């Protein structure tokens, strides 16, 4: 009997709510790229799972596969691929919010490729190189890659209606001083009450991450 060792890489994304999406796309993009690159071409398929094995699992699989399509074929078809994998497991990518999030992650990946920023991990070893690269002026342009990266950050911070839904509920509209400023769902303050109902626990306020 021959003894052998098998190396297993276990990645766990801890900030991804069930039935929801993370606050930011870049950490997810970095996580998927890092976990995917640990699997050699000669290796077997990656085992992906969440609580039910459909919503977050499907989102990971679609993003990972589309990143490879972008890199190898310079094209992608998200609906077609999702339809294909749903024939193998029902309900992959469980919510519309997760479907939109896939586009947001891939949009960020494409923008990063366009500014030549392929290495997502900033370390002490590549810090000087990345700073020099970002300070580079694009051809026939007065805009640096750092400027483009800032524009990308601004673009990805746009909020969609899914993330403002509690403030837009009919029973909560009168509690908003203005409809132009609504609480961000993942960061909203929830009032402690005996009745767990949105019209009682709602206040137009958000926690700030600093």
Image (cartoon, grey):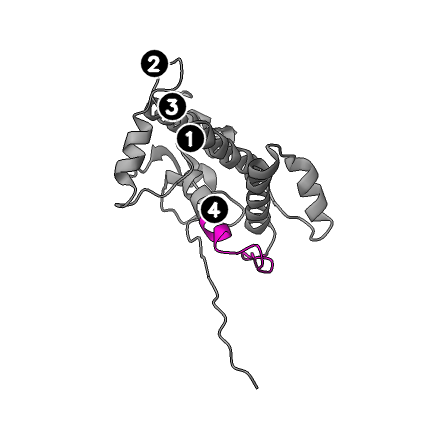
SS class, disc 3: helix
Is 37 colored magenta in this rendering? yes
Residue 51 vs residue 58, the one in the foreground? 58
Rendering quarter of residue 167: top left
Q: Are marks 4 and 2 in contact (CB under 8 Å)?
A: no
Q: Which residue is mark 4?
A: 33
In the displayed structure, 59 sits above or below 43; it is above
Q: Position of residue 161 (x, y in %)?
A: 50, 29
Q: Which residue is mark 3?
A: 148
Dot 1, how many residues are within 10 Å of its Cα: few (below 14), some (14-19), or many (20+)? few
- Determine the residue positioned at 42% across, 53% down: 14
For marks 1 and 4, the one nearer the N-term is 4
Q: Which residue is mark 2?
A: 142
Q: Which residue is mark 1?
A: 116
For marks 3 and 4, the one nearer the N-term is 4
Residue 24 in sight in this render:
no
Mark 2–mark 1 distance (CA, rounded to whole Å): 16 Å
Is 169 colored magenta in this rendering? no
For marks 1 and 3, the one nearer the N-term is 1
For marks 2 and 1, the one nearer the N-term is 1
Mark 3–mark 4 distance (CA, rounded to whole Å): 22 Å
Q: Position of residue 121 (x, y in %)?
A: 36, 43
In the displayed structure, 31 sits above or below 205; it is below
> Which dot marks residue 150?
none
For marks 4 and 2, the one nearer the N-term is 4
Mark 4–mark 2 distance (CA, rounded to whole Å): 31 Å
SS class, disc 1: loop
Q: Position of residue 199 (x, y in %)?
A: 46, 37
- Determine the residue positioned at 39% across, 40% down: 120
Magenta: main secondary structure: loop
Magenta residues (range):
33-52
């Amino acid at each position: 009997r021959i003894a052998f060792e098998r190396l297993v890489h276990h990645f766990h994304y801890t900030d991804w709510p069930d039935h929801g999406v993370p606050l930011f796309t870049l950490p997810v993009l970095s996580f998927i790229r890092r976990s995917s690159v640990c699997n050699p071409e000669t290796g077997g398929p990656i085992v992906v799972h969440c609580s039910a094995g459909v919503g977050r699992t499907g989102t990971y699989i679609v993003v990972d596969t589309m990143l490879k399509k972008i890199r190898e074929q310079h094209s992608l078809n998200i609906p077609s691929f999702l339809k294909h994998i749903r024939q193998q497991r029902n309900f992959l990518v469980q919510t519309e919010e997760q479907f939109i999030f896939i586009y947001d992650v891939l949009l960020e990946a494409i923008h990063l490729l366009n500014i030549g920023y392929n290495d997502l991990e900033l370390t002490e070893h590549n810090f000087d190189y990345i700073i020099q690269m970002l300070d580079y002026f694009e051809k026939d342009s007065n805009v640096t890659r750092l400027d483009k990266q800032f524009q990308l950050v601004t673009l990805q911070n746009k909020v969609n209606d899914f993330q403002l839904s509690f403030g837009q509920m009919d029973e909560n509209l009168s509690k908003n001083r203005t409809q132009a400023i609504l609480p961000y769902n993942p960061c909203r303050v929830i009032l402690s009450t005996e009745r767990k109902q949105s019209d009682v626990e709602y206040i137009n306020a958000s926690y700030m991450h600093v």
